[in-house]
Image (cartoon, rainbow, N blue to C red):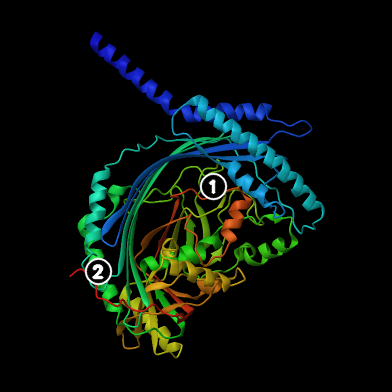
Amino acid sequence: MKNAIVLLAVLLSLASNAMAQKSVILDAMKDELARSMQQLKLEGEAGPYYVSYLITDTYVLRISADSGAITTNIENRNRVLKVDLRVGSYDQDNSNFLSLSNLAGLLSTLTSSNIRLPIDDDYDVIRRQIWQATDRAYKSAIETLTKKKATIQNTVQAEVLPDFVKGAATSTIEKEYSFAIGREQWDKRVDQIARLFLRRQNIQKSRVELNIQIANSYYVNSEGSTGIEPSSSARLTLAAATQAVDGMPLTNYRIYTAVRAEDLPEAAAVENEAKNLISELEAVRTAPLGDEYSGPVLFLGEAAGELFSQGFARLLAGTRLPLSDSPQANAMLGRTMENPFLSKLNMKVASNFLSFNAAPTMKNYNQKPLLGAYGMDEEGVPGRNVSLIENGMLKNLLSSRSPVKGVEQSNGHARGGSASPSIIQITSTNKKPYQQLKQDLITAVKEEGLSFGYIVRGLTPPSEAFSSDADVVESILQLQTAPPETTQFRLTKPYSVLKVYSDGREEPVRGIEFGTISINVLKNVLATSDDETVYAYPLNSLNPMAGLSGIIIRIASSGIPTQGSYATVITPSLLINGIDMKKSSGSYPKLPIVSYPIQ
């Protein structure tokens, strides 16, 4: 009995020491926050009315193979502190303002709000770094608020909203994730997949990349909120490129995401899909060019997920546009960046059989973990389920604590400096099996007086749009011709398209891309599939077709998307009318002069 008591005492001591070690980061944040709120004040100026600290401690493993051999194998550990410090009041503070007259000051705001910290759990060192970052953030906030007040005095504002809404003290404390990972097995996995591409005569370039990220986030604010929230993600990308017989570059992808690396598909399944990818590329090399088209298009599975992430996700976020000290910038912001859905609340925006729901706390779906789930957002507000579109009618938008007209309270969707999606589920009451959906496509084609329609099976993910110098040049050219109004959007190129004739025949085509798409296209959804695709996409992956709107808004709010942050959309396949497609333009590189060296 005595030995048992001694053993219990030892275990309790070890547990106590472990908890004490784990609380070092949070304790340093809390203690420096209390001191800042009490003592931080310039002579003749008010102190901050609100301060929050977010520390994200991250481990990243990246293994990449290029053309059959591993070229990158690195692991990295970093901690980043984000300071949100506000002077003034909830009604008017230093946020939601973009000063273009002082770009150096703007950069200073960014650098003072996002600071790299040492990775050692040293209480004194962490406090010192927080102290320095807070001091810089306070001085910058005072300067920004002064400029903002001067701008407001010379500006006629049609509507005045508070800059920030009050929050309640909340607490979400979860057990941190370990950064331990069996690295060797992933080296072997990437190497095995990469070698499948090596002896394929027509595959000119291939890439296999595995990114594993594990993070623990620590949060405190001056309203009393506290949080420790772990997260993890794994993304496996297979990409291959070839040239058609006329020299046209062609690519194809397989992308797998999971909350944990061990939840990625088994090696045999991935290797089989790699072989399918190669077969699809070899088949499309001799495929005919696509034709100009305007009519119904069926977006299958992951293509429907990418359509949502590139086109519709931003429409569901009630993002506050910043005020600027430049009249030209204010006009440009309003014309190209304002969300048109802000003026459509309680109006029809989609077909009446469609509904969109946000569920940030839904950690699992069909017994599989979901990327993007969280308990508390980056402003200390618990994530809340929101019915966004009900039977085609827009009922609400994702919101942060920066209110917008019609959505003046946060529903816990502040991520990376502005309201952003978490987990969105699209449901339908007009669900059909694939063959019936295909027949509906053919029927709609005939009704439009067309002889064929298109099925899109894959859209190039924005994260892959800058994978070569040619892609960068093309994306810059696309930006110059991007739609000037927010009532339209553009999509990246499809990499897998089928032409469907009125008799049901299918054939792959190449050299086709999308024209501009109206946001009203959701009203043109004719039917959906009876199955669903769970599609996760990185929030920090900027669509090259989207312009600079997301960048500017996040800079104005001093927010940078957390590396590795994901959102997930659960969507059926979508049959949509009124989609314009056109032939790709431009010149092509010549085919290689000498044949592939490996037989």
Residue ranking furthest to the top: 2
Image position, residue 122 (x, y; %): 47, 26
Q: Secondary structure at mark 2?
A: helix
Local secondary structure at mark 1 = loop
Residue for point 38% across, 25% down: 18
On the question of residue 4 being in view, the answer is yes
Q: Quadrant of residue 597?
A: bottom left
Per the image, the residue denoted by label 1 is 412
- When the figure is inspected, residue 163 is found, relative to residue 158, above or below; the finding is above
Residue 284 against residue 380 in the figure, above or below: below
Instruction: Count every numbered label the image shows and give the total.
Output: 2
Which one is nearer the viewer's eye here, 31 or 201?
A: 201
Percent position of residue 564, x then y = 43, 50
- Viewer-nearest of discs 1 and 2: 2
Q: Residue type at mark 2? A: Asn
Packing grade of label 2 (10 A; few <14, some 14-19, many >=20) is few
The front one of 170 and 273 is 273
Q: Are marks 1 and 2 in contact (CB under 8 Å)?
A: no
Quadrant assignment for the N terminus: top left
- The residue beneath circle 2 is 276
| Residue 93 appears left or right of 377 | right
The tag earlier along the polypeptide, 1 or 2, is 2
Mark 1 and mark 2: Cα distance apart in space: 41 Å
> How dense is the environment of label 1, judged by Cα within 10 Å: few (below 14), some, or many (20 and up)?
many
Measured as percent of width and height from the top left, residue 484 is found at 62, 71
Report the front residue among 262 and 382: 262
* Residue appearing at x 35%, y 78% in the figure: 438
The amino acid type, in three-letter code, at marker 1 is Gly
Horizontal side, residue 331 vs residue 110: left or right: right
| Residue 318 in sight | no
- The foreground one among 17 and 81 is 81
Residue 198 picture location, percent across and down: 23, 64
